[in-house]
Image (tube, grey):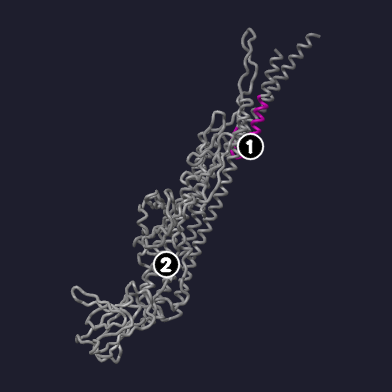
Amino acid sequence: MATSILSIGQSGLVAAQVGLATTGHNIANAATPGYSRQVVVQGAAQAQNFGFGFMGQGAEISTVKRIYSEYLGVQVQSAQTAKSGLDSYYTQIKQIDNLLADPTSGLSPALQDFFAGVQELSSNPASLPSRQAALSSAESLASRFQSLAGRLDEMKQGVNSQIQSSVGVINAYAEQIAKLNDAVSKAQRADGQPPNDLLDQRDQLILDLNKEIRATVVKQGDGNYNVFIGNGQPLVVGVTPAALTIQASATNPERIEVAYRASNGSVVSLSETGLTGGKLGGLIEFRSETLEPAQNALGRVAIGLASTFNAQHRLGVDLNGVAGGTFFTAASPVVTASSANDITSTAAVTASIGNANALTTSDYRLQYDGTDYTLTRLSDNTLVDTFDNTDFPRTVEGMTLNLASGTAVAGDSFLIRPTVNGASGIAVAITDPRLIAAAGALPVVPVGTSASGTNGGDVVIGAATVDSSYTTPLSAPVTFTYQVDAVNGDGFILSTPVTVTDTGAPPTTTSYAAGDIVPYVEGATISFGGISFVLNSPTSTAPADGDSFTVAANPFGVGDNRNALLLGALQTANTLGNGTANFQGAYSQFVSQIGNKTRELEVTSSAAGKLLSEATLSVQNESGVNLDEEATNLLRYQQAYQAAGKVMQIASEMFDVLLSLGR
């Protein structure tokens, strides 16, 4: 009996030792990330029948169990990946919000300064300092566009770098999880007991992985975790990790994409719509939903400004009496053929700006199925046009597409970015302030008419007009001299071909070659080289012999401000978005969108942070180490240890009594 009591005391001593060790382990790891509190699962040893009944044989330790709720753990993982994704997105978009909305370095003050310079020019069109000031403000505006575009491009490169870094971190986590899967399965096969610390380490890695990308865990019967990301791509299967990589987009070499390296060595790009949550998901969402649209929106304003300003500028006259030329240079759309196109394809698609007013801020995908081309607007994935090879050139949503050369093959795809380089490509095309076409807009100028002061008749020449065929400035005056010739006939003999359109019903037009006699027709329109004017007589008489009339470059362009006024009026004209917005309005619209999205992310991120805190608190309440509780356990196990020792001491004394009886 004494021996049995000794064994019982020993079992209690062992149980108390295990309890003390487990409690000490909990206390030591109270601050360890991912550590779950462990408890001793203790039971009574199997009783022994002594004939008079069953007598207990002490205690035994079944296992040391970790207190962990998979349900709560999944909640924390879900809250963590949402919070990390929102934080990543917010950190990036805040930079754009600060950049574009800045009251001093944003685009708005530069736009206002530019049109203020144009308004000043309209007040002093003959002043070279005013012209130089307008030109300088234009250069400042172009520089501001380029600066903003450069900053956005730097952010795009930064996003590429962060995506690459995040992919590396994800691969590292995958390898560690696979190794822990192996260690866990081996430990459980050895004695069937759960390796609690290894399980905690693996669950912490899963949580850390969710900081980078949303991951789904499927627990296997052998205790292994299979981990999946995206649209079900396996990242870890048992003890085998997969490998993510990055590669350049097939249609945009400057844009990197996340790809999956299959077991056969092939690399497949992952759909961006499936890569959500975590730092990586936030970066990808920011790039596709904010950064690239911002580049396009800024580019559209630049292209719209350059196109409309140039169109109006060409209708005016500069100080040299020459029709206005190109004021701003504008970037052309970028068309990139997919690297996955058939090697036999030779198609070269080009694009140009057909109507800046109709441009959107979206990119487009052009695909060929062997018969037809389909054009898809990528911002909302909407099919906007279908046409075949005979329909080129094709103008759609402000851009004109053309098959420049070659032949397309079924399956060919092209990425079209109409406005991506608009802001970086705008520049001032003129350097001489005298070339600013501030004088009257067409059709009144850039040519003027006059009659000789020595004319004997009363025929007068009307103001000249020009049409779209007037592309070459009038380099020298053209003089019409009337001759009375009884032999050859009265009329004008000119060195340039002209047409004469009378006012009959219907009107008739007669063409005269250079050197022909052009008779005088009362009220008829005389035209040459895109220039038209009318000769009239109050008394309906022909010109006198020797009367002359001159058409020349507008001699009144120095003090004329009519085109400058029209150029200044473009500031408030709705020339973008199919006539729904002006330059400032279009810019303010997308700045407002970014500001609203920034605020939305700030609020949503704060809410996600509170949800994560609550989920983490629930896990801590369930699995965390409570030092007060562990201190109580220390005292309890200490007392149990002392009591078990006392039992062994009594058993020893009883045994000594038995031995003394034998002496």
**Above or below: residue 438 compared with residue 364:** below
Toward the viewer: 312 or 108?
Answer: 312
Secondary structure of the residue carrying tag 1 is loop
Name which residue type carries label 1: Asn
| Residue picked out by circle 2 | 306
Toward the viewer: 517 or 443?
Answer: 517
In the figure, residue 349 lies in which quadrant? bottom left
**Above or below: residue 114 compared with residue 377:** below
Give the residue at x 48% y 71%. 139
**Above or below: residue 446 compared with residue 458:** above
Left of 365 or right of it: where is 4?
A: right
Toward the viewer: 493 or 172?
Answer: 493
Residue range highlighted in magenta: 15-37
x and y, in percent, of residue 387 in the image: 35, 53
First of labels 2, 1 by sequence position: 1
In the figure, residue 173 lies in which quadrant? top right
Q: Residue furthest top?
A: 51
x and y, in percent, of residue 540 in the image: 19, 85
**Above or below: residue 93 compared with residue 216:** below
In the figure, residue 407 lies in which quadrant? bottom left
Secondary structure of the residue carrying tag 2 is helix
Toward the viewer: 25 or 270?
Answer: 270
**Main SS of residues in magenta:** helix
x and y, in percent, of residue 111 in the image: 43, 67
| Residue picked out by circle 1 | 29
